Structure formats: structure tokens, C-alpha cells
Amino acid sequence: MKKLSVIIATVLFSFGVAKTISAQEINRGATQVGIANSSVSTGDDSNEASHGVNINIPTVALVDVEGVDGEATTVNLAPDVSALEAGEAVDFSDATDNSLWLNYTSIIASDQDERNITAEIDGTLPAGISLNLSAGGLSTGNGNLGASAGTITLTTNGQNLVTGIGSGYTESGFEKGHQLTYSLDMNNESYAALASGSYNVTVTYTITGN
């Protein structure tokens, strides 16, 4: 501030201005100059503002089975005996169905193991008959999706059908995800115990790791 006072006084006297400038006037002028060249702030406000944003990603584990008309309905399996000749064994291997598709959505935690999808049955199968199930390769989807575990023979205990699922989705609906194929197999050694009739079992799919 002292340096500013000396400069102003020198300029005024060099033009022959016969006026005495007091230190109070010099200080008042310097203060006005300072105000004119500074930004004004009020309280804690300034030319910037900020706040935090919390982002929460949920864990997700959803599985569904879809048919051509939406949610899966009952699958019917029966051997074709229309051309069966007397003396021949009934061929159960042609009793198949591939009309359903397995859909799923998964988001796992950073420290969580990859998920699997298991399948099991509830109910009683005909004597000597096995119900087999396989999941085909993925037709659609994005992310870290699972792989088919191959053909499994369904029992009342859950078995892995699709393994290695991370965070991803297959898309939803018919012809999305894994195509499911059901088939029958017959143990000929149990043929004597085989009885005609209608047998109903329920297949349950579970995606592991909530």
C-alpha cells in the first residue's frame, strides 16, 4: 500500500496539480480500486458447488423357463408306437421335447463365487424310466453367462445344468438363452416292472447364490 501511494503522488505532481493529497484519500482510493477488481462472495458460497452421489448396485439372481406362448406349461413325453411291430421293444428314445428355453439374469458381488443353475424333479417316474435334460448353447445374451453342463439324468437331488454364471443376462422369452431338451431312457432290465399310465413329475430350476 505504501508503494501505491508514492506512485499516485508522483503522477499528480508531474502534471503540476497543486493539490495536497492526504493519506486518508489515498487509502480510500486504493480501497475502491481493490473493490472494483475483486469478486464478491457471500457466506460460504463461491463460484463452485458440489455434493455426493451414492450408487447402489443390487445382487440379482432370477431364473425362468419360457415357451412359445410365454410361461412354460406342461411338457408331454410319450414313445411313438404307431409303427411298432409285434415282438419289438418300445423305443423310448424318440420321446423328446425341445420347446422350452431357459432365461436368467444375474449380478454377483465382487467377492462372490459364480452361480450355477440346478435342476431336480419331484414325483415318481415309471419303473425303469429315466428323464434326461440338457441345456443347449446360448442363443442370445450379454455379460458373463454360463455354460451347459451337458446332459443330466434328473433325480430328486439338484444337479448342475448350467455353470459359471457371473453378471449377465440371456434376454427374456422364447428362443432366448439356453434351449432345453427333455428325453426318456428305458432300462430294459426293468421292463417287467413297467406299467402303462400317466405319470406326473415337476422339474424345478434353481439359480444358486442369492
Image (cartoon, helix red, strand yellow):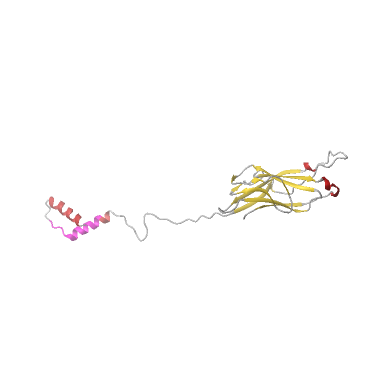
The N terminus - image quarter:
bottom left
Residue at figure coordinates x 75%, y 44% from the top left: 183
Closest to the observer, 71 or 195? 195
Q: Quadrant of residue 25?
A: bottom left
Q: Which residue range is magenta in the image?
A: 19-33
| Residue 5 x %, y % | 18, 56
Using residue 90 as the reference point, say whether residue 5 is left or right of it.
left
Q: Position of residue 180 (x, y in %)?
A: 70, 45
Q: Is residue 25 magenta?
A: yes
Q: Can you tell which quarter of the image residue 29 is in?
A: bottom left
Q: Among all residues in the image, which is located at the extreme right?
A: 86
* Residue located 62% across and 53% down the image: 61
For the residue pair 113 and 38, the one nearer the viewer reads as 113
Q: In this rendering, is residue 79 above or below 6?
A: above
For residue 78, side relative to residue 171 (left or right): right
Residue 142 place in picture, x, y as percent = 59, 45
For the point 24% across and 55% down, which residue is it?
33
